[in-house]
Image: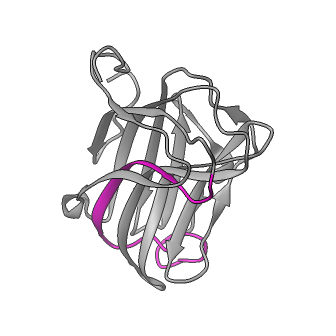
Amino acid sequence: MVGEGARGTHALRIAAAANGERRIYTDAAKLGSGHWGRVFYKVQIPVPTVFVHSTMVALQGVGPTRGPEEVRVVDTVKDANGKHQFLYNVQPNGAEFGKGSPYNWTFDGRWHCAEWHIDGPTQSYHFYFDGAEVTSIALDNGPMNYAGTDIPPSFSQLRVGWNNYQSAPPGFVAWIDEVALDVHRIGCAN
């Protein structure tokens, strides 16, 4: 949308929907077993007043112990009081699992930078908000230790946009911009 970019003039605007998926899927085979990622996002306020789990960036792959799964690397859960947490969340065929931060953030109508690093060989995940690591959700299991991570050896899809897992009328209006992936950290300034 013209005039709504994080640092430029265009961004992907995601219209409100009470629940469900509004995402773009793309091939992620070239990402291999690990990568750095970065996305800018903005969420229009006010936001829905109910509890809701929402994903902005996810990866699809076949986990080493649980089979096909969605690995959610930019993921939030918002409580009914307006605070949200970030989390690493995995949805295999069966019960989802993950690791969440405290509910220390709010959607505020401003642009923010989310970064992640995920690595299959070391079964590690790290998340950064506006350049600072959210250490409460860091995972460093080590090779072949899959409990709580189950990071696939490769990814087949990258999914970017918005997905609500509970009904949250009237929904979120959000903007996504400057999605970038690399073998090295990209950062929020680049």
**Residue at image x 45%, y 40%?**
115
Tell which of 151 and 80 is nearer to you: 80
Q: Which of the 4 image quadrants contains residue 122?
A: bottom left
Quadrant in the picture for the N terminus: top left
Q: What is the x, y in percent for residue 89? A: 56, 62
Q: Is residue 107 left or right of residue 39?
A: right
Magenta segment's dominant SS is loop
Q: What is the x, y in percent for residue 189? A: 38, 21
Q: Which of the 4 image quadrants contains residue 180?
A: top left
Q: How many marks?
A: 0
Note whether 162 is above or below 187 in the view shown. below
Report if residue 108 lies within the magenta region. no
Q: Is residue 107 left or right of residue 64?
A: right
Tell which of 143 and 68 is nearer to you: 68
Q: Is residue 109 visible?
A: yes
Q: Is residue 138 visible?
A: no
Note whether 152 is above or below 30 in the view shown. below
Report if residue 160 lies within the magenta region. yes
Note whether 69 is above or below 187 in the view shown. below
Tell which of 111 and 33 is nearer to you: 111
Q: What is the x, y in percent for residue 37? A: 36, 44
Q: Residue furthest right?
A: 81
Q: What is the x, y in percent for residue 80? A: 78, 44
Quadrant in the picture for the C terminus: top left
Q: Is residue 180 left or right of residue 129?
A: left
Q: Which residues are magenta?
A: 142-167
**Residue at image x 36%, y 47%?**
36
Q: Which of the 4 image quadrants contains residue 83?
A: top right
